[in-house]
Amino acid sequence: MTHIPSAVSPTPVGSTAVPINPDKNYLETPQTTKVLYCDVVFGSPSMNCNGTGICRINISNFIQAQVPKKQCHLTSGLLASGPGGKISLFFFRDRFCIRQYRKHFHKGVFEMKEACPIPAKISKGLQLRAKKLLPGSYTVWEGDGYFRLDIEVA
């Protein structure tokens, strides 16, 4: 069963399951909020995906069961349209390696020093006109087994 964080949908955990549309790369909640599966590579684009921030974000067909230890800079998660025209990213604690957590979510703040391009497929899937995630310092919201970032877009 796919778990959607309660921040995406007001439906409490344990209620009816969210239907998955196999013809599309997103889930549709009863409130028609679109949620995309994604793979995120951490780092800075200009530093060949080293450093902090988000280097690349790609649409995926599923949440990876486990990320290999040697790929600590990569994780899977969920994307949704966030509050105020932002994009909300959801990462699951059990998909993070400890180095990733310490480096990117230090003291509850996620730092992006440069913009990250948003693939057209993601913008279309979330019905946004955004082309990039903007640099900034973003609060890391912690939920039951997941982290959420609300990132400004342009």
Image (cartoon, grey):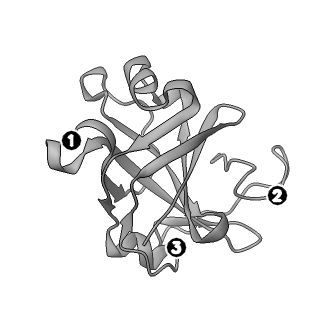
Q: Residue at x 65, y 69 (%)?
A: 84
Q: Quadrant of the C terminus?
A: bottom left
Q: Is residue 145 left or right of residue 80?
A: right
Q: In which quadrant of the rendered view does residue 98 lie?
A: top left
The type of residue carrying mark 3 is Leu
Q: What SS does tag 2 mark?
A: loop
Q: Residue at x 21, y 50 (%)?
A: 45
Gap between marks 2 and 1, in whole Å? 35 Å
The type of residue carrying mark 2 is Pro
154 w.r.t. 1: above or below: below
Q: Is residue 79 left or right of residue 69?
A: right
Kindly identify which residue carries mark 3.
126
Kindly identify which residue carries mark 1.
49
Report the mark closest to the observer, 2 or 1.
1
Gap between marks 3 and 2, in whole Å? 18 Å
Q: Is residue 31 left or right of residue 131?
A: right
Asked if the residue at tag 2 contacts the one at tag 3, i.e. Cβ–Cβ closer than 8 Å, the answer is: no
Instruction: Point out residue 72 in the picture as x, y percentages from the top left corner.
Output: 31, 27
The tag earlier along the polypeptide, 3 or 2, is: 2
Instruction: Point out residue 142 in the picture as x, y percentages from the top left corner.
Output: 66, 35
The tag earlier along the polypeptide, 2 or 1, is: 2
The type of residue carrying mark 1 is Cys
Kindly identify which residue carries mark 2.
10
Residue 104: numbered disc: none
46 w.r.t. 133: above or below: above
Report the mark closest to the observer, 1 or 3.
1
